[in-house]
Image: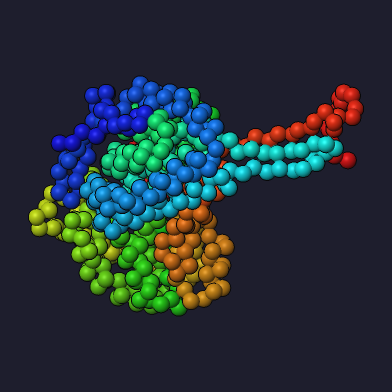
């Protein structure tokens, strides 16, 4: 049994609270490690040490900070397989998907190498007689990230990269379900030259999160996870005067127009609905074919594809399309929701309820499910299932289809499949959702654009990664400067205006 602690001041340390959580191997159901759950005192001590280390780092020129990021990228590439293996072992996703998880984080680190350029301020020469005006982007001090289980490499890197490149110290509270990869990332950053104390990885649960929310030194918090927790963290963090951005859950709709290439749409739906066992905030969980004929054609194409999906452990390599879900509780919750779908009258056209994998009976595997004739009043439509379950809602018209996506409480991602440019353009313009795909089922923006949902999928201002992340982790200071040669008159008693 492995004991997993924290990463404090450049070293792995054991937990001191006496509280731990089980870390499972989702493929076998076995407990493979115990992760320490930090106490408030441990979190406060980690933050105090980070605060001591930050001023020197903030004063280091941005090019030198960028060079640490450059080295980090090289080390991530060197250790890619090792990281992906550790990630699959605790999360359950396939090895190739785990590499994608690391890669999409790495790409944000690559973006952060541009810190010297991204942190350049603004300058106005001669804003008044002999007056220059300039704005600086300065680090906030000590900032924190609280991250979910489903991307244990990517999302911590989305947070730590920009925060550190901007000159902050960063406290990471990763998911207690898969804590190993974040600790490995911290070790790699140390090897890349990051001075000790600037990245503290504190494992824990609500107690550690609350300690971060209430600690006066913490200036900003970036959160990613489920909507109820996102809302809680946003409310408490803001009430404590912090800058907070929280990204929550999702229910992503894909609209399939009658003129769409139906094979392409079905392939896209299978990948986006069932990849990573549906445990992606950008997974498509609702298919909305427009017109009964489109729906019939789509279901006909989907059924054999869904039935052919291969479910198994990451150790089976390329023979697997998706792995187990993260915990036994997640599996039970998915099965519970599937039952509500059946009871409430949806048609279960692919039934994965009896799925079992020989040799892995205790693993948290869930078979692929496909529902047809789902309606907006059903629990499977309203709730984020976060499992391999795709719901089909039949819409009569395009207006009804776009209305469904617009009326849903979540607004993370969406997609439309069509050959018609006018329809696609109208959809992209009108939809009240943060990330939109046109014939692209999972429109996750690349590192140099920004990522964020609307409605109950995102609380606060500014998105993740891209230029927004450099704004989120810095604050603006504006200097108005006049040298004695420009001072011509005596005291002024009214507000200066430019006439
Ligand atoms: P979660 O909300 O259970 O946990 C996220 C983090 O919050 C973890 O670090 C956890 O330890 C902490 N936490 C959990 N309960 C808490 C409590 N009561 N008080 C304080 N902190 C608490 O989410 P999860 O199950 O790890 O991740 C899945 C969810 O994340 C899904 O809803 C998914 O859609 C969402 N997600 C969203 C995005 C996005 O960018 N919008 C990306 C990935 C995942």
Seen from the viewer's position, the closer of residues 472 and 127 is: 127
Q: Quadrant of the C terminus?
A: top right
- The number of numbered discs placed on residues in the rendered structure image is 0
Q: Residue furthest right?
A: 489
Measuring 35% from the left and 47% from the top, which residue is drawn there? 75
Render colour scheme: rainbow
Q: Quadrant of the N terminus?
A: top left
Horizontal placement of 289 versus 118: left or right?
left
Measuring 25% from the left and 73% from the top, which residue is drawn there? 304
In this picture, is 203 found above or below 328? above
Residue 172, horizontal then vertical, whole percent: 39, 36
Q: Name the quadrant where ligand 1 sits.
A: top left
Horizontal placement of 386 versus 465: left or right?
left
Residue 137, horizontal then vertical, whole percent: 60, 38
Seen from the viewer's position, the closer of residues 290 and 444 is: 444
Measuring 22% from the left and 40% from the top, which residue is drawn there? 23
Query: Can you tell which quarter of the image residue 305 is in?
Result: bottom left
Residue 423, horizontal then vertical, whole percent: 53, 71
Measuring 80% from the left and 41% from the top, which residue is drawn there? 126
Residue 93, horizontal then vertical, whole percent: 26, 54
Query: Can you tell which quarter of the image residue 261 is in?
Result: bottom left
- Residue 332 is at least partly visible in this image: no
Seen from the viewer's position, the closer of residues 20 and 114 is: 114
- Residue 286 is at least partly visible in this image: yes
Seen from the viewer's position, the closer of residues 183 and 240 is: 183
Horizontal placement of 133 versus 182: left or right?
right
């Amino acid at each position: 049994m492995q004991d997993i602690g924290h990463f404090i001041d450049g070293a792995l340390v054991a937990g001191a609270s006496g509280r731990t959580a089980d870390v499972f191997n989702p493929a076998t159901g076995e407990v493979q490690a115990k992760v320490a759950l930090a106490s408030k005192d441990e979190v406060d001590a980690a933050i105090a040490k980070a605060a001591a280390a930050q001023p020197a780092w903030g004063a280091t020129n941005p090019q030198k900070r960028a060079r640490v990021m450059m080295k980090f990228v090289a080390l991530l590439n060197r250790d890619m397989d090792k990281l992906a293996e550790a990630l699959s072992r605790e999360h359950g996703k396939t090895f190739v998907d785990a590499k994608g998880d690391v890669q999409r984080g790495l790409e944000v680190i690559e973006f952060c190498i541009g810190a010297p350029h991204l942190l350049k301020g603004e300058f106005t020469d001669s804003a008044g007689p002999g007056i220059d005006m300039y704005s600086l982007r300065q680090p906030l001090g000590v900032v924190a990230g609280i991250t979910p289980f489903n991307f244990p490499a990517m999302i911590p890197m989305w947070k730590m990269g920009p925060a550190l490149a901007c000159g902050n110290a960063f406290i990471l509270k990763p998911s207690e379900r898969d804590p190993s990869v974040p600790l490995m990332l911290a070790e790699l950053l140390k090897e890349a030259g990051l001075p000790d104390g600037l990245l503290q990885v504190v494992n824990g649960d609500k107690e550690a999160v609350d300690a971060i929310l209430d600690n006066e030194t913490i200036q900003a918090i970036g959160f990613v996870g489920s909507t109820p927790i996102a809302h809680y963290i946003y409310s408490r963090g803001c009430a404590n005067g912090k800058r907070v951005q929280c990204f929550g859950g999702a229910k992503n709709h894909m609209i399939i127009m009658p003129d769409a290439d139906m094979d392409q749409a079905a392939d896209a739906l299978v990948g986006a609905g069932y990849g990573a066992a549906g445990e992606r905030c950008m997974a498509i969980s609702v298919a909305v074919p427009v017109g009964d004929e489109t729906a019939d054609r789509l279901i006909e194409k989907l059924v054999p594809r869904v039935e052919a999906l291969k479910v198994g452990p990451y150790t089976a390599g390329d023979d697997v399309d998706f792995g187990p879900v993260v915990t036994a509780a997640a599996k039970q919750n998915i099965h519970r929701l599937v039952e509500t779908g059946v009871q409430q009258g949806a048609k279960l056209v692919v039934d994965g309820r009896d799925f079992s994998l020989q040799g892995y009976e205790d693993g948290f595997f869930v078979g692929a499910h496909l529902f047809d004739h789902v309606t907006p009043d059903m629990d499977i439509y309203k709730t984020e299932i976060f499992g391999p379950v795709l719901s089909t809602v039949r819409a009569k018209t395009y207006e009804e289809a776009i209305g469904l996506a617009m009326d849903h409480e979540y607004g993370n991602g969406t997609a439309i499949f069509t050959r018609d440019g006018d329809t696609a353009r109208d959809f992209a313009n009108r939809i009240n959702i943060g990330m939109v795909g046109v014939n692209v089922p999972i429109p996750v923006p690349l590192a140099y654009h920004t990522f964020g949902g609307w409605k109950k999928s995102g609380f606060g201002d500014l998105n993740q990664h891209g230029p927004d992340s450099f704004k989120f982790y810095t604050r603006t200071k504006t200097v108005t400067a006049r040298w004695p040669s420009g001072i011509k008159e005596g005291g002024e008693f009214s507000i200066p205006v430019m006439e």
